Amino acid sequence: MTTHHPTIRRLVYGHAQLHDCLAFADADTAAEEAEEIKALAAARTWGEARQVQMTHLWNPAGPECYEPEDGYPDDRPFKINDVGSVMEGDWPRMVTERAFELLPEDLQDRFGKRHFTAHNGDYLEIPIDHESELVAELREHGYEVTRDDELINVLDGRSFNPLAG
């Protein structure tokens, strides 16, 4: 029986502003996920927000969370920061948490430090100054790695988050 290796071999990474460290995402889906986040943030009414199609993420303004009869009619103006799971920091999930799934454990241990947050779970803090060494190691492990700071921060909700400074 062969050992199963993760099929994710293409990574995008960048400087995540919120935690001031490096963060990684699956390069095959990251751009599409970012578009889903932007689409929801751009919705002008609750009706529009409810209809944003999500392939990779869940829709925190969707009908399973907010019903028109509960005071969220389709024509009510929509602000993404009024959504409970967005305010609580649960959506989108922290981009710095993805490293646990994407990076080989030995590299997580060598380059990163697990941090606990009271509300949103753990994330891996990878100091910026480890960038060149970690990227080189990943390439040796057969990963294709590209840097895109803007994409990483969109995935982290920086484009609309009230905490974005």
Image: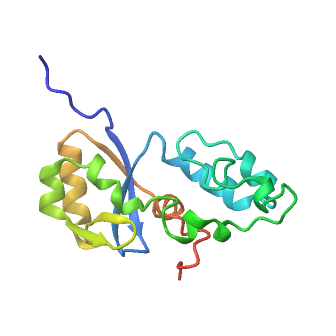
Q: Looking at this view, name the residue that lies furthest to the front.
A: 69
Q: Is residue 17 above or below residue 23?
A: below
Q: Is residue 148 left or right of residue 125?
A: right
Q: Position of residue 69 (x, y in %)?
A: 80, 55
Q: Looking at this view, name the residue that lies furthest to the top.
A: 1
Front in this rendered view, residue 125 or 46: 46
Snapshot colouring: rainbow
Q: Looking at the image, which residue is at 54% across and 69% down? A: 158
Q: Is residue 44 above or below residue 51?
A: below
Q: Is residue 18 left or right of residue 139?
A: right
Q: Looking at this view, name the residue that lies furthest to the right.
A: 75
Q: Is residue 65 left or right of residue 164?
A: right
Q: Looking at the image, which residue is at 82% across and 66% down? A: 77
Q: Position of residue 122 (x, y in %)?
A: 30, 64
Front in this rendered view, residue 54 or 159: 54
Front in this rendered view, residue 15 or 62: 62
**Number of numbered discs:** 0
Q: Looking at the image, which residue is at 55% across and 63% down? A: 85
Quarter of the picture containing the N terminus is top left
Q: Position of residue 152 (x, y in %)?
A: 46, 60
Q: Position of residue 21 (x, y in %)?
A: 33, 71
Q: Looking at the image, which residue is at 16% across and 50% down? A: 105
